Amino acid sequence: KRRPKKMAEEEAPEMMRSLAKTRLPEALQVLGEKHELVNEVIQWCESSYVSGNKAEVQAQTKEYIVDALDTITKEVEATSSKLMEFLALQDNAIEDMTTQLAILKERLSISKELNAAARLAEFRKPLHVEPRQDKIQTLNDDERAEHMPVIVGYEKDFEARFRAFDDVGTCLHA
C-alpha cells in the first residue's frame, strides 16, 4: 500500500478538498475529451481508408492510434495517481480519526472511573465522631452543697461498718 508522506494536519483537508472538487473532476473531463478525440480519429481513419490510398491511410492510422493510446495511457496514469492520492489522504484521515476516537474513548472511561470513585468516596467517608470527653468540673463548697445530695447518717453508717471488722482478728485467737 503506497502512502503519501504525512503532511501537516492543516494541509490534508485542503488537499482532499482540492482533489475532490477540482483536480479529479478536471482529470476525468480531460479523459472524456481524449475519448472524443480518439473517436474522431477512428471516424477519419474509416472514411479515409475507404476513399484514399489504403497503405498511406493504414500507416497514418497506426501512427494516430499509437499517439492516442500513449496520450490516453498518460492521462489514465495521471488520473489514477490523483485518485490514489485522494484515497490515501482519506485513509490517513480515517486512521487519525480512529486514533482520536480511541483517545476520547479512553479519556471518557477514565473520567467515568474518576467520577464513580468520587461518588463512592462520598458514601464511604467515615463519620468523624470525636470521642466524648466528660467535663471534669470542680465544685466549690457552695456548689457542692447545692448539687450533691446530703446523706443523712453517713458517718454513723460508715463507723458501724468499720466496727464490724474490728472483731475479725480477735476471733481467730480465742
Image (cartoon, rainbow, N blue to C red):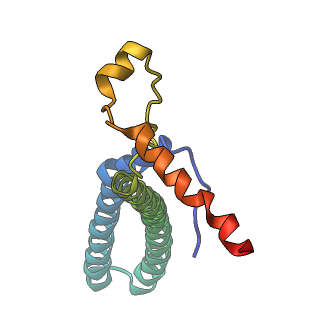
Above or below residue 134? Residue 164 is below
**Residue 23 rendering spot, x and y as whole percentages:** 38, 51
Q: Position of residue 114 (x, y in %)?
A: 42, 54
Count of marks, rendered view = 0
Depth order, front residue of 126/15:
126
Q: Position of residue 28 (x, y in %)?
A: 32, 62
Q: Is residue 4 left or right of residue 120?
A: right
Picture layout, residue 144 above or below residue 104: above
Q: Nearer the viewer, residue 38 or 148?
A: 148
Residue 107 appears in which quarter of the rendering?
A: bottom left
- The outermost residue toward the front is 174
Residue under the image location 36 percent in, 17 percent down? 143
Residue under the image location 35 percent in, 48 percent down: 17
Quadrant of image for the N terminus = bottom right
Q: Residue at x 44, y 30 (%)?
A: 135
State the residue at coordinates (58%, 59%). Answer: 165
Query: In this picture, is 45 found above or below 5?
Result: below
Q: Quadrant of the C terminus?
A: bottom right
Q: Is residue 19 above or below residue 78?
A: above
- Residue 129 visible? The answer is no
Residue 156 appears in the rendering: yes
Residue 2 position within the rendered picture, expressed as x and y whole percent measured from the top left: 59, 71
State the image quarter where residue 35 is shown.
bottom left
- Asked whether 150 or 46 is in front, the reply is 150
In front of the other: 161 or 115: 161
